[in-house]
Every structure is written in structure tokens, then in C-alpha cells.
Amino acid sequence: MRIATWNVNSIRTRADRVLAWLDRTDTDVLAIQETKCRDDQFPHLLFEAAGYEVAHTGINQWNGVAIVSRMGIHDVETAFPSQPAFGRGEPVVEPRALGATVGPAALGGDASGNAGVRVWSVYAPNGRALGDPHYDYKLAWLGALAEAARGWAGEPTLLLGDWNVAPLDEDVWDIEVFAGATHVSEPERAALAQVEAAGYEEVSRRFTPGEYTYWDYQQLAFPRNNGMRIDLAFASPAAAERVRRVWIDRDERKGKGTSDHVPVVIDLEPAARG
């Protein structure tokens, strides 16, 4: 099973590109972030015509997450338990997390040994600036997700997406440039580390050391390789043991009309039979 994650920075703008990539890479499941559309605006028909079922949550031109799968989608959740809300006036639970079981409906798998996997498409808050209310929201959001994820760690589970945190200094092109900024602060890194403490391994690093997943559109960041590693793949033990390969498709940042992020792809072996 090939599962990927990609912050596409507007699905309506890049639907054709995403569909072409799915076809070219033979990807079964894609967790998508920053769809930037309401549910009724998502290009369902295009994906369904290509053989993919769609689960999406979005309420306006901001945020939005989805999972598309050609192996079935079951038990969709559009928020995780105790997901924090944000906003002036009456806070809103933003569309930043969507979970679904992909593959056979039962986690026990089918006759061929293919077991279903619980996938969460995750778009963590940006934080904006140290001391900003959005920064406090980000820390609370990551902590609440880690606590919820602790209860899923016993099943094959993948937490995939744009985490808006660079866990290590090597995950940005120049740590000195980020002094006093978000994405590299110790509280953010500590909040993200709670996910690993809940029983998950970030599996991309052991296959793609030193690689980035994001380059800003400004100041020739991509040609200069001024990038960041903020798109991550956390796997529970039952999922991590099935990971055969992880790769970052850097070529998807080339050319015109690209997202500022690129896909991270996870290849899973079939589940071992008991």
C-alpha cells in the first residue's frame, strides 16, 4: 500500500496536478492539507472519476484537510477528541484534522493479508509569532492531538501532514535565521515530541535524512535550497513495522504553479499474518 501526505496549498488550483501525480506514482491513499475550500467546493467528481473516494472537511478559504483513497474509506472523523477551538468571539474547531480507515473495513485485513490502516491528515496551526494567541493555540492543539493519539497507538495508525514544526536544527537551512521565530522554538518542539512519547515514530527521517519538504515562494528559496522539514509521518508500532520505504518527491516543487510543499510518500508492506 502506498500512502502519501501533501500540503497542496489549494486543491481547486492544483487538482489536475495532484491527480496527475497520483497516477504517475501509483499512490493508493493521499492525505491532503490546506485544501482552502468548503466541502461543496472540493472537486469530488474529478477524484471519483479517477477511482478515488473522498473524505474532506473545510468551511472556508482557509485550512481544510482531506483523504482520498482508491482502497476504500471507512469511519471518517472530522476532528479528534478534545480538539481545541480558535477564533475571536465564539471559537471554532477549525478543519485541521481528519481521520479515516483506509483499506479493508476491518483492521484485521482481507484474505490477501492487506490490513486497513487508520490515517489522520493533520494541518497543525502555524502559530504566527511567539507570544501570539495563535502560538498558545498551536501548543494546546499539538498537546491535545498527542493525548488523543495515545489511545490509537495500539492499532496501525499514521499521523500525516504539515506539522508546522521543524523538530531539529538540521530541519531548516539556517537555524540562525529562525532565532526568535516560530517553528523551531523549544515549546513547539516539546509539544510535537509528545506525539512520539505517545508511542509513535517519525518514520520519514530514517529514509530521507537531511531532506526538506517546504520552500517559501519568496527570495529564490527553492533554487537556493533554503528549505524546511515540516511535513512529517508519525507511525504507531503496528504501522511502523510495515514501513518499507519513505521518499520525498522534491521534483513536485519544480516548474510553475507548484505548491510550496512536496509530497512525502510511505510504502507499506502487507500486514504479517498471525
Image: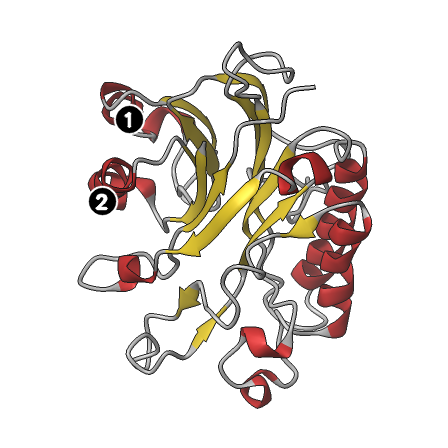
Q: Which residue is mark 1?
A: 47
Query: Which of the image's four quarters has the C terminus?
Result: top right
Asked whether the beta carbons under mark 1 and mark 2 sit within 8 Å of each other, the answer is no
**Where is 99 relative to 4, above or below?**
above
Of labels 1 and 2, earlier in sequence is 2
Residue 242: percent from the left, percent from the top? 59, 38
Residue type at mark 1 is: Phe
Q: Which residue has dot 2 on it?
A: 17
Which residue is at 29% across, 42% downward?
25
Q: 273 or 64, which is in the foreground? A: 273
Query: Looking at the image, can residue 155 be seen?
Result: yes
Is 23 drawn above or below residue 103 in the view shown? below
Q: Callout 2, which amino acid?
A: Arg
Relative to 136, 257 lies left or right? left
In the rendered image, which quarter is residue 107 located in? top right
Q: Residues within 10 Å of mark 1 (few under 14, many from 20)?
A: some
Dividing the picture into quadrants, the one containing residue 36 is top left
Q: Percent position (x, y) of residue 41?
A: 33, 29
Residue 9 position, x and y percent, is 37, 51
Q: Nearer the viewer, residue 124 or 250?
A: 250
Residue appearing at x 37%, y 78% in the figure? 225
- The residue depicted at 65 percent of the width and 40 percent of the height is 241
Describe residue 138's horizontal placement relative to residue 75 as left or right: right
Q: What residue do we see at 25% from left, 36% from top?
A: 19
Residue 33 visible from this viewpoint: no
The front one of 149 and 211 is: 211
The answer to whether residue 107 is above or below residue 21 is: above
SS at mark 2 in the image:
helix
